[in-house]
Amino acid sequence: METKKKHILLVDDNPTNLRLGINVLEEKYNVATAPSAAKMFSLLEKITPDIILLDVDMPEITGYEAIKTLKENPKTKDIPVIFVTARTESDDELEGLFLGAIDYITKPFPPLLLLKRIEVHLLVEAQKAELQNLNDNLQEMVNEKTQDVIDLKNALLKTMSGMVEYRDDITGGHIERTQSGISILLEEIEKNSLYQEETKGWDTELVLQSSQLHDVGKISISDVILKKPSKLDENEFEEMKKHAGFGEDIIKDIESMTKKSDFLKYARIFAASHHEKWDGSGYPRGLKGDDIPLLGRIMAIADVYDALTSIRPYKKAFTHEESVKIITENSGTQFDPTLVELFVKANEKFRALRKT
């Protein structure tokens, strides 16, 4: 199979040099010529040569000026340039290489030397292109494998959170609704430039994904309690309260078997702190005020709003207005007052979420 000829663009204001260049190169290469830098730029709008042989001393636009323009243009910046010039000073050669040329050949040159220099540089460029192609393919393979891992993680996450909902069948859809509620509050926090220090470095997508595990500790709660069709008595409620600690322990066990993960860190915080209360009367640790992680304070509002607006065997579903009123009345006792203000501002989004 015949190898496709490479394209050389020869730029020189001397017709004799152009003719000499054509005679030397045309047997091995497709050669185009330009008598000035301006003509070269015009030609480059139509063709993309594999190498440009560029004279330095030309009227109007010198070779040094021309290469600067070539390197500034995204379309031409990667075309290799070899200076071919009568200048012999080392400073001239250094300047040409500094400006981005790959080689510097002085006139008069032996034809075989010019051919060999071009051959070597074309080989280097071909190897660079092959390496780049290999790197691109490798990156694509890595991306595919990474996406496979992400898809697997999401599937496992969905299955695990689904197990909680299937067992605690009175809260169907609760996980997705609280996830959406958290998203609304996070948007309000960002919009109002609040809690910037606490949220610095948060990966919002991971935060939302990890929130699905906030009730994972319910896996360890007895079905007798979890599926009880009436209100829990005091002892049963004390047992139910343990799900926050169980959830934290479950995620800690997973963390101990894996590398450090922001996803698991967020999930652990959600699981452990979403039932803490602003006044310190919550569980499992009785944390108070800002000692409660921000993720837990956010989840507390999204979690309670969904519980209030959902039907339970022991209560009717409160209306949106009633639920907003209850959460507002518990500002500063159960909930972070600042977050309650944001919730009130965005309450219509919660109403729309509930309708959906």
Image (spheres, rainbow, N blue to C red):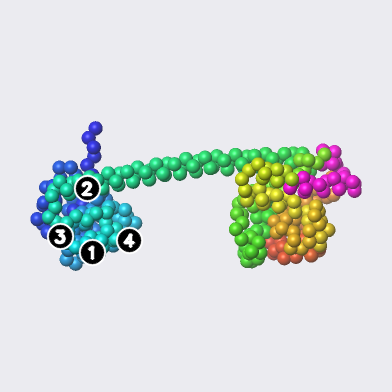
Label 2's element?
helix
Q: Residue at x 71, y 52 (%)?
A: 269
Rendered image: mark on residue 91: 1
Q: Residue furthest front?
A: 90
Q: Nearer the viewer, mark 1 or mark 3?
A: 1
Cα gap from disc 2 to disc 4, whole angstroms: 23 Å
Q: Nearer the viewer, mark 4 or mark 1?
A: 1
Q: Nearer the viewer, mark 4 or mark 3?
A: 3
Cα gap from disc 4 to disc 1, whole angstroms: 23 Å
Q: Is residue 311 magenta?
A: no
**N-term mark: 2 or 4:** 4
Q: Main secondary structure of the magenta part?
A: helix
What is the number of callouts on the image? Answer: 4
Rendered image: mark on residue 86: 3
Residue at the spot of label 2: 118
Give the image location of residue 322, x and y in percent. 80, 58
Q: Residue at x 54, y 42 (%)?
A: 147
Give the image location of residue 303, x and y in percent. 75, 53
Highlighted magenta segment, given as a residue range: 223-248
Q: Residue furthest top?
A: 1
Give amino acid for label 2: Ile
Quadrant of the image occupied by residue 323: bottom right
Residue at the spot of label 4: 72
Give amino acid for label 3: Ala
Mark 4 is surrounded, within 10 Å at the Cα level, by few (under 14), some (14 to 19) or many (20 or more) other residues, namely few
**N-term mark: 4 or 3:** 4
